[in-house]
Image (cartoon, rainbow, N blue to C red):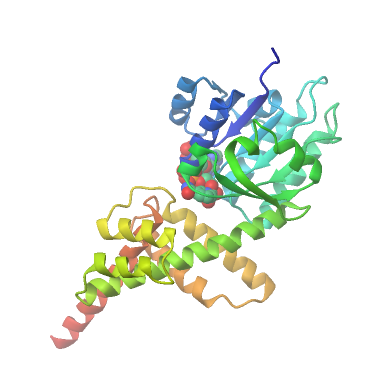
């Protein structure tokens, strides 16, 4: 019987926990790391090994995935200090194969390039060098249920060598059912993923605006959502998030702080390219407002509250004027 492949996973948030569990279920020999240790326990119970630093993971595993919140987290785990992933890569035994490091976090092009260059530099310090494997940016589309069911969409950027090393039965093939290689650099993947996040943030922002107006107009929210679902504007996202907005159920699937981060990164890209993005800028303002209201860790459907707050604030100032 062949030895199961050694796969590492860094970051066990809402997405990472389900992706790592999926890899364990495919029969891979999985070692996980998470900054908050408590989140490693369910994975240990499933049969994964638990490492106390990212370096411990990259020293032992030939294929390592990272699924971290944002640019700061992706850089910290990959490059900050002697416990970081690149330190573990540089310390790999002389007999080890070249590592493949796959960052699935949604970040900007500069972060992908920075982490990718650091990984490749650390690989060159090892006996195996960088003659195989390498760095792949592979942000995803899909939610935690897709992580659990292996139906994620991967938007990849990197060398064909790294891509091929990641597209294996205990890698991307276990976690996703469709994938695209957008180009040879991490930035190609980062930009592609931000295109989707512009759409998602703006659609859910528009939906929240419609719901606030529906309520203020005294219309039946359920009936309006029903019409929407049968109209040309109906889609799965509006049906799911509309129901959550109506119920006021904001337990997190994709958190407000992450959608706001994605719009911020997309607006930086638009600025760099000189492309006007006024709709994204307006939506971003509402996600910032939701963060200020203490909703950073609520599901991003909670952006509805930012519109309700606006309606209430206006009424209050009207009352003051009358007085
Ligand atoms: P999450 O639940 O908030 O998890 C974030 C992860 O990042 C946790 O493991 C967290 O560790 C870690 N982290 C944050 N800051 C860190 C730091 N400074 N140093 C080390 N680790 C740090 O987020 P998520 O929903 O899993 O999303 C992960 C990524 O996938 C994000 O880039 C997001 O935009 C993207 N994404 C999410 C979804 C979704 O539906 N949720 C869908 C597609 C893409 P702790 O546990 O210690 O805080």
Image x and y of residue 270, in percent:
63, 71
**The N terminus: image quadrant:** top right
Q: Is residue 118 or residue 143 the one in the foreground?
A: 143
Question: Residue 131 lies in what quarter of the image?
Answer: top right
Instruction: Specify whether residue 177 is in view.
Output: yes
| Picture residue at 37% right of the left edge, 62% below the top | 303
**The C terminus: image quadrant:** bottom left
Residue 181 versus residue 130 in the image, above or below: below
Image x and y of residue 295, in percent:
35, 55
261 vs 208, left or right, is: right
Residue most toward the bottom? 322
| Picture residue at 59% right of the left edge, 28% below the top | 53
Image x and y of residue 52, in percent:
56, 25
Image x and y of residue 88, in percent:
70, 29
Q: Is residue 130 or residue 233 the one in the foreground?
A: 233
Residue most toward the top? 1
| Picture residue at 78% right of the left edge, 20% below the top | 93
Figure label count: 0
| Picture residue at 71% right of the left edge, 37% below the top | 166
Residue 215 versus residue 57 in the image, above or below: below
72 vs 99, left or right, is: left
Question: Residue 312 lies in what quarter of the image?
Answer: bottom left
Residue most toward the front? 230
Question: Residue 300 lies in what quarter of the image?
Answer: bottom left
């Amino acid at each position: 019987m062949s030895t199961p492949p050694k796969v590492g996973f860094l970051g066990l948030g809402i997405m990472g926990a389900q992706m790592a569990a999926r890899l364990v279920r495919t029969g891979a020999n999985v070692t996980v790391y998470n900054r908050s240790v408590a989140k490693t326990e369910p994975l240990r119970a499933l049969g994964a090994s638990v490492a106390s630093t990212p370096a411990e993971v990259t020293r032992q595993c030939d294929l390592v995935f990272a699924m971290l919140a944002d640019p700061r987290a992706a850089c910290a785990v990959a490059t900050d200090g002697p416990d970081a992933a690149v330190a573990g890569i540089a310390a790999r035994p002389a007999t080890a194969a070249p590592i493949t490091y796959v960052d699935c976090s949604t970040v900007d092009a500069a972060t992908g390039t920075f982490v990718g260059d650091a990984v490749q530099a650390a690989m060159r310090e090892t006996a195996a060098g960088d003659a195989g494997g390498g760095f792949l940016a592979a942000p995803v589309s899909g939610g935690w249920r897709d992580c659990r069911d292996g139906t994620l969409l991967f938007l990849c950027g990197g060398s064909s060598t790294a891509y091929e090393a990641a597209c294996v039965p205990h890698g991307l093939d276990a976690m996703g059912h469709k994938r695209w290689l957008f180009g040879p650099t991490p930035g190609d993947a980062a930009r592609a993923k931000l295109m989707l996040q512009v759409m998602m943030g703006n659609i859910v922002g528009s939906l929240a605006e419609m719901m606030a107006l529906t309520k203020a107009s005294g219309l039946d929210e359920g009936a309006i959502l029903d019409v929407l679902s049968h109209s040309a504007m109906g889609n799965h996202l509006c049906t799911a998030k509309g129901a959550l907005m109506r119920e006021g159920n904001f337990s997190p699937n994709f958190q407000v702080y992450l959608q706001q981060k994605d719009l911020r990164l997309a607006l930086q890209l638009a600025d760099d390219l000189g492309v006007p993005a006024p709709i994204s800028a307006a939506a971003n303002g509402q996600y910032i407002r939701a963060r200020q209201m203490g909703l950073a860790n609520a599901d991003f459907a909670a952006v509805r509250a930012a519109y309700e707050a606006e309606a209430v604030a206006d009424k209050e100032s009207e009352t003051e004027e009358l007085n």
